Amino acid sequence: MSHSTEALVIALVRRAARNAPSALSARLEEEWLADAQERTSNLSRLRFAAGCYWASIAIGLEHRPASVPAAGAAHGNTASIVLEPPRFLSSRAVTFGLVLSLHAAVFCGLMLGGTTYFKPAEPPAIQPRVIERPLPQIKPPPPSIDHSLVDRRVSPPVLPPDVVPAQPQLPNVVTAPELLSEPRGTPGSLPSREIARVQGGIGPAFPHPADFYPDVSRRFEEQGAALVQVCVDTAGRLTSEPVSTQSSGSARLDAAAIKLAKAGSGHYRPTTEGGRPVSACYPIKIRFQLQN
Amino acid sequence: MGKTTGNVRMSLQTLKVLESFLENPLEQLSGADVHQRCRIASGTLYPILLRLEGAGWLVSRWEGIDPSAAGRPRRRLYRLTSTGLKRASEVFASFNRGVLA
């Protein structure tokens, strides 16, 4: 038997014997130490010592007022023990209850501890940021054009935060195609008409970029603005797939910008020419920005 | 638990212990010897031995050696008393009658 196991067995047996009634503890200690040496393996000795512990509890429950000969008095003599009548709670029932409550305590500890110490990390909250951009300025028509025909101004679009139209494709005042076909300045011809063209943008119901912010980008705190070219019909719907024209610096954010541009189909504000919506392509800038 | 005979509760483990003593009623057995014969764990065996001893069915004495000379603790040896032999025989006979009846 290794020294550590032997020491452990002796300590367990002595502790078990001390738990027994004082009149029996010395006798049981010597008896159990002698019987422990009869065991052949270390594991068997350890099991024996653990069993002695439970035996001492059972003996203690049965022999509370017991009158037993002490070890010193039992040198080579017979012994007699007066037993109590059987009790309602037997030692086995008490032992079973102890083991059951120990298992329940360990189970509860694991369940409560697991939920307390392992909480999933919450991603940082996103706060929308309003970007103030100057409204596109409409260049005055060339001097040769009759200004009386161009007096339409369109109120600036109402934009949701984080999504701003890119710089408009200026000039915004172009000559109507039908008028371009007419010879200019020809005597007797109709006067040329300049039609105000207002580039489209995003409508008030356009989706918010925060709803399309990739989780991985949030975790890595990726931010940036992507430029996406969209072609929109008169009803504000996309007529072709949006194309990324300028990267935000992150492929994930670029993909999210394309996704957002597709999701916004039907919510674009169409380009107008002379107050009439027309199909046109224009860039929009989608900014993904994290806020604390 | 078990059936009570006199002031000893009869359980399956108690019967096994008595059976190991009845194999040779004059033989003196230590707790380790009883364990080898009936394979009862120490947590159950020693309370049974003390219970039987308290009821007068067993008597015990220390092994007649000098621990310091032998280099080991003395063993506690148990033996059936005449009362124990008679009562144990009756218990087993009653069980046999019950089984065979």
Image (cartoon, coloured by chain):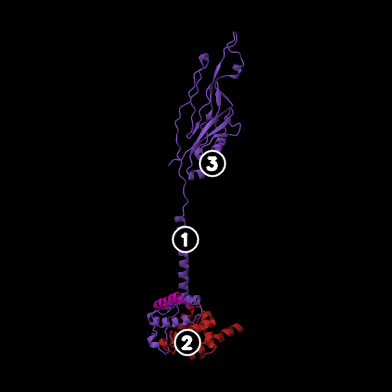
x, y percentage for residue A149?
Answer: 53, 15
Question: Could you confirm whether marks 2 and 1 are on the same chain?
Answer: no
What is the quadrant of residue A88 in the picture? Answer: bottom left
The kind of secondary structure element at disc 1 is helix
The kind of secondary structure element at disc 2 is strand
Determine contact: label 3, label 2, CB under 8 Å.
no
Looking at the picture, does residue A8 appear above or below residue A79?
A: above
Q: Of circles 3 and 1, which is in front?
A: 3
> Chain A: what color?
purple
User: In the rendered view, does A165 fall on the left or right side of A241?
Assistant: left
The chain drawn in red is: B
Q: Which residue is mark 2?
A: B78
Q: Which residue is mark 3?
A: A252
Residue A256 in the magenta stretch? The answer is no
Looking at the picture, does residue A244 appear above or below residue B50?
A: above
Query: Which quadrant does the C terminus of chain A fall into?
Result: top left
How crowded pointer 1 is (Cα within 10 Å; few <14, some 14-19, many 20+) is rated as few
x, y percentage for residue A284?
Answer: 53, 32
Q: Tell me which amino acid carries mark 2.
A: Tyr
Q: Which residues are magenta?
A: A1-18
Q: CA distance from mark 2 to mark 1?
A: 47 Å
x, y percentage for residue A233?
Answer: 59, 28
What is the quadrant of residue B69 in the picture? Answer: bottom left
Checking the image for residue A110, the label placed there is 1
